Amino acid sequence: MRLQEIVLRTVRLPLIHPYVLSYRTFTEFEPIIVEVRDADARVGWGEGHISPGSSSETRDGGWTFCREHAAAVIGKDSSEAKAIIARDLAASKVAATALVTAIEMLERHPLLSVDRDTRLPLLTPFNSSAPGDIEREVEQRLTDGFRTFKIKVGKSAEDDARRVKLVQRAIAGRATMRLDANRAYPESDACRFAMALDPAGIELFEQPCPAEDWEANARVASVSPVPVMLDEPICELADVKRASAIANVGFCKLKLKLKRFGDLDLLREALDAVHE
Protein backbone atom coordinates (compact mmCIF):
# COMPACT_ATOMS: atom_id res chain seq x y z
CA MET A 1 0.00 0.00 0.00
CA ARG A 2 1.13 3.56 -0.73
CA LEU A 3 1.41 6.30 1.86
CA GLN A 4 -1.04 9.00 0.82
CA GLU A 5 -0.75 11.36 3.78
CA ILE A 6 1.46 11.77 6.86
CA VAL A 7 0.48 14.19 9.62
CA LEU A 8 3.00 15.03 12.35
CA ARG A 9 2.01 16.59 15.65
CA THR A 10 3.76 17.50 18.86
CA VAL A 11 1.57 17.74 21.94
CA ARG A 12 2.18 18.96 25.45
CA LEU A 13 0.59 16.83 28.18
CA PRO A 14 0.75 18.40 31.66
CA LEU A 15 1.13 15.84 34.44
CA ILE A 16 -1.17 15.86 37.48
CA HIS A 17 1.85 15.01 39.65
CA PRO A 18 5.52 15.64 38.75
CA TYR A 19 7.40 12.55 37.60
CA VAL A 20 10.70 12.56 39.49
CA LEU A 21 13.74 10.77 38.04
CA SER A 22 17.32 10.84 39.25
CA TYR A 23 18.35 13.06 36.33
CA ARG A 24 15.22 15.17 35.72
CA THR A 25 11.77 16.03 37.07
CA PHE A 26 9.03 16.08 34.45
CA THR A 27 5.98 18.29 34.85
CA GLU A 28 4.75 17.50 31.33
CA PHE A 29 5.36 15.04 28.51
CA GLU A 30 5.81 16.20 24.89
CA PRO A 31 5.46 13.25 22.54
CA ILE A 32 5.51 13.27 18.75
CA ILE A 33 2.31 11.80 17.27
CA VAL A 34 2.38 10.37 13.73
CA GLU A 35 -0.78 9.77 11.66
CA VAL A 36 -0.42 7.88 8.36
CA ARG A 37 -3.16 7.31 5.75
CA ASP A 38 -3.34 5.45 2.46
CA ALA A 39 -5.55 6.02 -0.59
CA ASP A 40 -8.32 3.86 0.90
CA ALA A 41 -8.53 6.07 4.00
CA ARG A 42 -7.02 3.43 6.26
CA VAL A 43 -5.10 5.00 9.12
CA GLY A 44 -2.18 4.10 11.35
CA TRP A 45 -0.84 5.85 14.42
CA GLY A 46 2.60 6.02 15.99
CA GLU A 47 3.97 7.85 19.00
CA GLY A 48 7.39 8.59 20.44
CA HIS A 49 8.45 10.48 23.56
CA ILE A 50 12.05 11.69 23.71
CA SER A 51 13.08 12.01 27.34
CA PRO A 52 15.90 14.58 27.61
CA GLY A 53 18.75 13.10 29.62
CA SER A 54 17.76 9.50 28.97
CA SER A 55 19.92 9.33 25.84
CA SER A 56 21.70 11.62 23.40
CA GLU A 57 18.48 12.19 21.45
CA THR A 58 16.88 15.63 21.58
CA ARG A 59 13.31 16.69 20.92
CA ASP A 60 14.39 19.12 18.20
CA GLY A 61 16.42 16.37 16.57
CA GLY A 62 13.52 13.93 16.71
CA TRP A 63 11.12 16.45 15.22
CA THR A 64 13.56 17.24 12.39
CA PHE A 65 14.01 13.50 11.75
CA CYS A 66 10.24 13.02 11.46
CA ARG A 67 9.78 15.99 9.13
CA GLU A 68 12.63 14.97 6.83
CA HIS A 69 11.73 11.28 6.66
CA ALA A 70 8.00 11.89 6.29
CA ALA A 71 8.79 14.06 3.26
CA ALA A 72 11.10 11.34 1.90
CA VAL A 73 8.57 8.49 2.11
CA ILE A 74 5.27 10.15 1.21
CA GLY A 75 3.83 8.46 -1.88
CA LYS A 76 6.03 5.41 -1.49
CA ASP A 77 4.99 1.81 -0.84
CA SER A 78 4.83 1.07 2.88
CA SER A 79 7.58 -1.58 2.73
CA GLU A 80 9.93 0.78 0.90
CA ALA A 81 9.08 3.57 3.35
CA LYS A 82 9.98 1.41 6.36
CA ALA A 83 13.28 0.44 4.73
CA ILE A 84 14.18 4.10 4.11
CA ILE A 85 13.44 5.03 7.73
CA ALA A 86 15.25 1.97 9.11
CA ARG A 87 18.46 2.95 7.31
CA ASP A 88 18.69 6.01 9.59
CA LEU A 89 17.42 4.33 12.77
CA ALA A 90 20.53 5.27 14.77
CA ALA A 91 19.99 8.99 14.12
CA SER A 92 16.83 9.06 16.25
CA LYS A 93 15.45 5.71 17.36
CA VAL A 94 12.42 7.26 19.08
CA ALA A 95 11.40 9.30 16.04
CA ALA A 96 12.04 6.40 13.67
CA THR A 97 9.91 4.12 15.83
CA ALA A 98 7.03 6.61 15.82
CA LEU A 99 7.04 6.63 12.01
CA VAL A 100 7.55 2.89 11.54
CA THR A 101 4.90 1.82 14.03
CA ALA A 102 2.35 4.12 12.38
CA ILE A 103 3.09 2.39 9.08
CA GLU A 104 2.90 -1.05 10.72
CA MET A 105 -0.52 -0.18 12.11
CA LEU A 106 -1.60 0.98 8.65
CA GLU A 107 -0.45 -2.40 7.29
CA ARG A 108 -2.45 -4.21 10.01
CA HIS A 109 0.60 -5.98 11.38
CA PRO A 110 -0.55 -9.28 12.95
CA LEU A 111 1.16 -8.54 16.28
CA LEU A 112 -1.24 -5.63 16.72
CA SER A 113 -4.27 -7.89 16.52
CA VAL A 114 -5.48 -8.98 19.97
CA ASP A 115 -8.13 -11.66 19.54
CA ARG A 116 -9.14 -12.06 23.18
CA ASP A 117 -9.66 -9.98 26.27
CA THR A 118 -6.33 -9.45 28.01
CA ARG A 119 -5.70 -7.97 31.44
CA LEU A 120 -2.28 -6.62 32.31
CA PRO A 121 -1.38 -5.25 35.76
CA LEU A 122 -0.08 -1.67 35.82
CA LEU A 123 2.60 -0.38 38.16
CA THR A 124 2.44 3.08 39.71
CA PRO A 125 5.23 5.57 40.37
CA PHE A 126 5.65 6.47 44.03
CA ASN A 127 6.53 10.04 45.01
CA SER A 128 6.43 10.58 48.78
CA SER A 129 9.47 10.88 51.03
CA ALA A 130 8.29 12.00 54.48
CA PRO A 131 7.04 9.16 56.74
CA GLY A 132 3.46 10.44 57.09
CA ASP A 133 3.20 11.18 53.38
CA ILE A 134 4.55 7.72 52.55
CA GLU A 135 1.88 6.02 54.65
CA ARG A 136 -0.89 8.10 53.07
CA GLU A 137 0.33 7.49 49.54
CA VAL A 138 0.67 3.74 50.10
CA GLU A 139 -2.93 3.52 51.32
CA GLN A 140 -4.20 5.63 48.41
CA ARG A 141 -2.33 3.56 45.81
CA LEU A 142 -3.64 0.33 47.31
CA THR A 143 -7.18 1.76 47.33
CA ASP A 144 -6.71 2.66 43.66
CA GLY A 145 -5.96 -1.01 42.98
CA PHE A 146 -2.21 -0.90 42.36
CA ARG A 147 -0.12 -3.81 43.60
CA THR A 148 3.28 -2.86 42.17
CA PHE A 149 5.02 0.36 43.22
CA LYS A 150 8.01 1.84 41.37
CA ILE A 151 10.42 3.65 43.68
CA LYS A 152 12.95 6.00 42.11
CA VAL A 153 16.37 6.01 43.78
CA GLY A 154 19.84 7.13 42.72
CA LYS A 155 20.55 10.31 44.68
CA SER A 156 21.93 9.24 48.07
CA ALA A 157 22.53 5.58 48.90
CA GLU A 158 21.81 6.09 52.60
CA ASP A 159 18.76 8.33 52.18
CA ASP A 160 17.36 6.11 49.44
CA ALA A 161 17.78 3.00 51.59
CA ARG A 162 15.97 4.65 54.50
CA ARG A 163 13.10 5.72 52.23
CA VAL A 164 12.78 2.23 50.74
CA LYS A 165 12.55 0.77 54.25
CA LEU A 166 9.78 3.25 55.15
CA VAL A 167 7.80 2.37 52.02
CA GLN A 168 8.37 -1.33 52.67
CA ARG A 169 7.08 -0.99 56.22
CA ALA A 170 3.98 0.93 55.08
CA ILE A 171 3.18 -1.62 52.37
CA ALA A 172 3.46 -4.45 54.91
CA GLY A 173 3.43 -7.19 52.30
CA ARG A 174 0.35 -5.92 50.43
CA ALA A 175 2.21 -4.99 47.24
CA THR A 176 5.59 -5.49 45.58
CA MET A 177 8.23 -2.87 44.86
CA ARG A 178 10.55 -2.19 41.93
CA LEU A 179 13.56 0.08 42.51
CA ASP A 180 14.99 2.18 39.67
CA ALA A 181 18.19 4.24 39.86
CA ASN A 182 18.06 5.47 36.23
CA ARG A 183 21.87 4.94 35.90
CA ALA A 184 22.58 7.53 38.61
CA TYR A 185 24.70 5.67 41.17
CA PRO A 186 28.48 5.33 41.08
CA GLU A 187 29.39 1.68 41.56
CA SER A 188 30.34 2.03 45.24
CA ASP A 189 27.08 3.81 46.13
CA ALA A 190 25.01 1.30 44.18
CA CYS A 191 26.68 -1.60 45.98
CA ARG A 192 26.20 0.07 49.36
CA PHE A 193 22.52 0.73 48.62
CA ALA A 194 21.92 -2.81 47.34
CA MET A 195 23.58 -4.45 50.33
CA ALA A 196 21.36 -2.42 52.70
CA LEU A 197 18.18 -3.82 51.14
CA ASP A 198 15.81 -6.24 52.82
CA PRO A 199 14.67 -8.25 49.77
CA ALA A 200 11.19 -8.96 51.15
CA GLY A 201 8.64 -7.71 48.64
CA ILE A 202 11.25 -6.18 46.28
CA GLU A 203 10.97 -7.60 42.78
CA LEU A 204 14.06 -6.04 41.18
CA PHE A 205 16.65 -3.24 41.19
CA GLU A 206 16.72 -1.46 37.82
CA GLN A 207 19.79 0.05 36.14
CA PRO A 208 21.97 1.01 39.11
CA CYS A 209 24.98 2.41 37.18
CA PRO A 210 25.66 4.15 33.84
CA ALA A 211 24.52 2.23 30.77
CA GLU A 212 27.97 1.86 29.24
CA ASP A 213 29.54 0.51 32.44
CA TRP A 214 28.60 -3.14 32.17
CA GLU A 215 31.26 -4.13 34.70
CA ALA A 216 29.90 -1.80 37.40
CA ASN A 217 26.35 -3.07 36.90
CA ALA A 218 27.63 -6.66 37.06
CA ARG A 219 29.40 -5.98 40.35
CA VAL A 220 26.22 -4.48 41.81
CA ALA A 221 24.29 -7.56 40.67
CA SER A 222 26.85 -9.77 42.41
CA VAL A 223 26.15 -8.21 45.82
CA SER A 224 22.45 -7.37 45.44
CA PRO A 225 19.95 -9.52 47.38
CA VAL A 226 17.38 -8.85 44.61
CA PRO A 227 17.79 -9.40 40.85
CA VAL A 228 19.11 -6.51 38.76
CA MET A 229 17.25 -5.33 35.67
CA LEU A 230 19.20 -3.78 32.80
CA ASP A 231 17.41 -1.07 30.83
CA GLU A 232 19.42 1.52 28.88
CA PRO A 233 22.19 -0.93 27.78
CA ILE A 234 19.63 -3.19 26.07
CA CYS A 235 19.50 -1.84 22.51
CA GLU A 236 19.90 -4.94 20.34
CA LEU A 237 19.86 -8.72 20.47
CA ALA A 238 23.55 -8.94 21.32
CA ASP A 239 22.89 -6.92 24.47
CA VAL A 240 20.24 -9.39 25.62
CA LYS A 241 22.74 -12.24 25.18
CA ARG A 242 25.44 -10.33 27.03
CA ALA A 243 23.07 -9.61 29.93
CA SER A 244 22.06 -13.26 30.15
CA ALA A 245 25.64 -14.21 31.01
CA ILE A 246 25.81 -11.93 34.08
CA ALA A 247 24.97 -13.56 37.39
CA ASN A 248 21.88 -12.13 39.12
CA VAL A 249 20.80 -10.03 36.15
CA GLY A 250 17.29 -11.39 36.15
CA PHE A 251 15.52 -9.02 33.77
CA CYS A 252 16.01 -7.04 30.57
CA LYS A 253 13.74 -4.09 29.92
CA LEU A 254 12.78 -3.58 26.30
CA LYS A 255 12.16 0.10 26.42
CA LEU A 256 8.61 1.41 26.38
CA LYS A 257 7.02 1.71 22.97
CA LEU A 258 9.78 -0.50 21.50
CA LYS A 259 11.78 2.66 20.85
CA ARG A 260 15.14 0.91 20.90
CA PHE A 261 14.27 -1.80 18.40
CA GLY A 262 12.46 0.18 15.73
CA ASP A 263 9.80 -2.26 14.54
CA LEU A 264 7.50 -4.94 15.88
CA ASP A 265 9.29 -7.93 14.35
CA LEU A 266 12.62 -6.94 15.92
CA LEU A 267 10.87 -6.33 19.23
CA ARG A 268 9.26 -9.78 19.08
CA GLU A 269 12.64 -11.34 18.35
CA ALA A 270 14.16 -9.53 21.34
CA LEU A 271 11.29 -10.58 23.62
CA ASP A 272 11.79 -14.20 22.61
CA ALA A 273 15.50 -13.88 23.35
CA VAL A 274 14.79 -12.44 26.81
CA HIS A 275 12.42 -15.31 27.62
CA GLU A 276 15.04 -17.82 26.45
Image (spheres, rainbow, N blue to C red):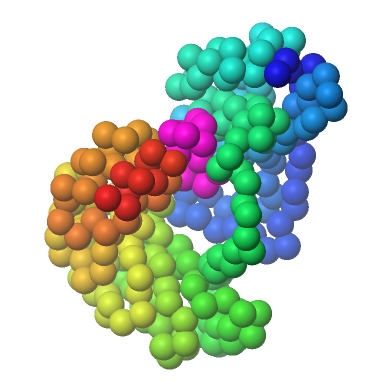
Q: Is residue 264 magenta?
A: yes
Residue 57 visible in the shown view: no
Nearest to the observer: residue 192 or residue 203:
203
**What x and y, as percent, mark residue 45?**
72, 36
Judge whether 213 appears above or below 173 on screen.
Answer: above
Quarter of the image for residue 221 reads bottom left
Is 259 displayed left or right of 169 in the figure? right
Q: Is residue 179 above or below residue 245?
A: below
Q: Residue at x 39, y 76 (%)?
A: 164
- Residue 138 is situated, as x and y percent measured from the top left of the image, at 55, 83
Q: Look at the image and tell me in which quarter the N terminus lies.
A: top right
Depth order, front residue of 241/161: 241
Query: Residue 272 or 159: which is nearer the viewer?
Result: 272
Q: Is residue 260 left or right of residue 106?
A: left
Q: Residue at x 71, y 57 (%)?
A: 15
Residue at x 62%, y 31% (from the top left corner):
104
Q: How many marks?
A: 0
Residue extending furthest toward the front: 115
Magenta residues, as a range? 255-267
> Does the magenta portion include 193?
no
Q: From the viewer's perspective, tell me whether residue 131 is left or right of residue 165.
A: right
Look at the picture and state if 12 lies above or below 124.
above
Q: Is residue 169 visible?
A: yes
Question: Could you tell me residue 118's position as x and y percent?
Answer: 60, 63
Whole-percent x and y of residue 182? Answer: 41, 52
Q: Nearer the viewer, residue 133 or 45?
A: 45
Asked where in the image residue 237 lies, by quadrant, the reply is top left
Residue at left offset 54%, top offset 87%: 135
